[in-house]
Image (tube, grey):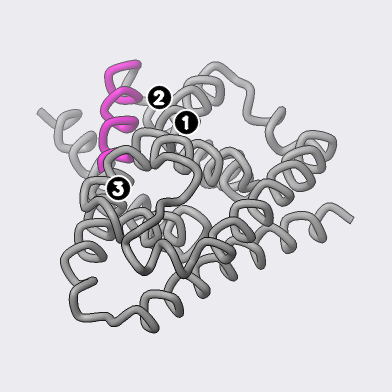
């Protein structure tokens, strides 16, 4: 019974730590707002794309590969390639902002792809897992593999809930915006992607 209580307390702490991490502004949030403009359920696919990268990463850390993701060569590759991808996505979003805002166009990449790209191109995502995330996984390991699986479910559920909430909120509130506001929103989202992309590239030097 005492062990169950400890596990529940641990999972509660995981929930709050995970929510704090997932709610931080960044590329995933920007692309969720952009995709949520057309599809209220886009967040579900973006969260799935995020999970496609995140769950295998958690498994690798669980089996002892944390140091690999914090090594300088890996951080440089992720920073350069990932940063370039985000800049490219941001530029595409900016160029298409008028037709997307007018409901006659769509971003040239799907929600699932957007989730995969914005997650895998973020070096700070890997750094978080190599530090804070690793600490949590080690703590989960104290409860055995079942504790680790519950940790994975709780953490990814936080991602799913928040990202879906953002896309639904964006979709349901878009009728309050005129085309000019829509264009401004897309311009801001594209700027966020470009800024983060350039930040990631610069950070490797």
Q: Is residue 57 above or below residue 109?
A: above
For the C terminus, the image quarter is bottom right
Q: Nearer the viewer, residue 5 or 115?
A: 115
Residue 43, label in figure: 3
Is the Cβ of the residue at disc 2 closer than 8 Å to that at disc 1? yes
Q: Dividing the picture into quarters, in which one does residue 67 lie?
A: top right
Q: Is residue 17 above or below residue 102?
A: above
The residue that mark 1 highlights is: 138
Residue drawn 29% across the image and 46% down it: 42
The residue that mark 2 highlights is: 141
Give me the C-alpha separation between circle 2 and circle 3. Answer: 30 Å
Q: Is residue 68 left or right of residue 136?
A: right
Is the Cβ of the residue at disc 3 closer than 8 Å to that at disc 1? no
Label 1's element?
helix
Query: Which secondary structure dominates the residues rendered in magenta?
Result: helix
Count neighbours of disc 3 (C-alpha within 10 A) and say few if under 14, some if 14 to 19, many if 20 or more. Answer: many
Residue drawn 72% across the image and 40% down it: 78
Count neighbours of disc 1 (C-alpha within 10 A) and say few if under 14, some if 14 to 19, many if 20 or more. Answer: some
Residue 129, x across and y down, in percent: 55, 40
Is the Cβ of the residue at disc 2 closer than 8 Å to that at disc 3? no
> Outermost residue toward the right?
205
Give me the C-alpha separation between circle 2 and circle 1. Answer: 5 Å
Q: Nearer the viewer, residue 154 or 183?
A: 183
Q: Nearer the viewer, mark 2 or mark 3?
A: 3
Q: Is residue 149 magenta?
A: yes
The residues colored magenta run 145-157
For the N terminus, the image quarter is top left
């Amino acid at each position: 019974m005492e062990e169950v209580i400890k596990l529940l307390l641990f999972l509660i702490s995981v929930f709050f730590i995970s929510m704090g991490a997932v709610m931080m502004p960044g590329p995933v949030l920007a692309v969720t707002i952009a995709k949520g403009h057309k599809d209220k359920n886009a967040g579900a696919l973006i969260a799935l794309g995020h999970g496609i990268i995140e769950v295998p990463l958690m498994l690798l850390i669980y089996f002892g590969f944390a140091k690999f993701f914090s090594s300088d060569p890996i951080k440089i590759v992720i920073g350069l390639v990932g940063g370039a991808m985000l800049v490219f996505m941001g530029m595409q979003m900016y160029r298409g902002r008028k037709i997307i805002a007018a409901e006659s166009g769509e971003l040239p990449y799907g929600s699932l792809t957007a989730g995969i790209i914005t997650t895998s191109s973020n070096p700070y995502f890997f750094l978080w897992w190599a530090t804070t995330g690793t600490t949590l996984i080690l703590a989960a390991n104290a409860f055995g593999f079942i504790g680790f699986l519950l940790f994975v479910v709780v953490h990814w559920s936080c991602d799913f809930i928040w990202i879906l909430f953002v896309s639904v909120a964006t979709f349901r509130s878009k009728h309050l915006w005129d085309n000019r506001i829509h264009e401004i929103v897309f311009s801001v989202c594209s700027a966020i992607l470009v800024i983060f992309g350039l930040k990631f590239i610069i950070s490797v030097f």
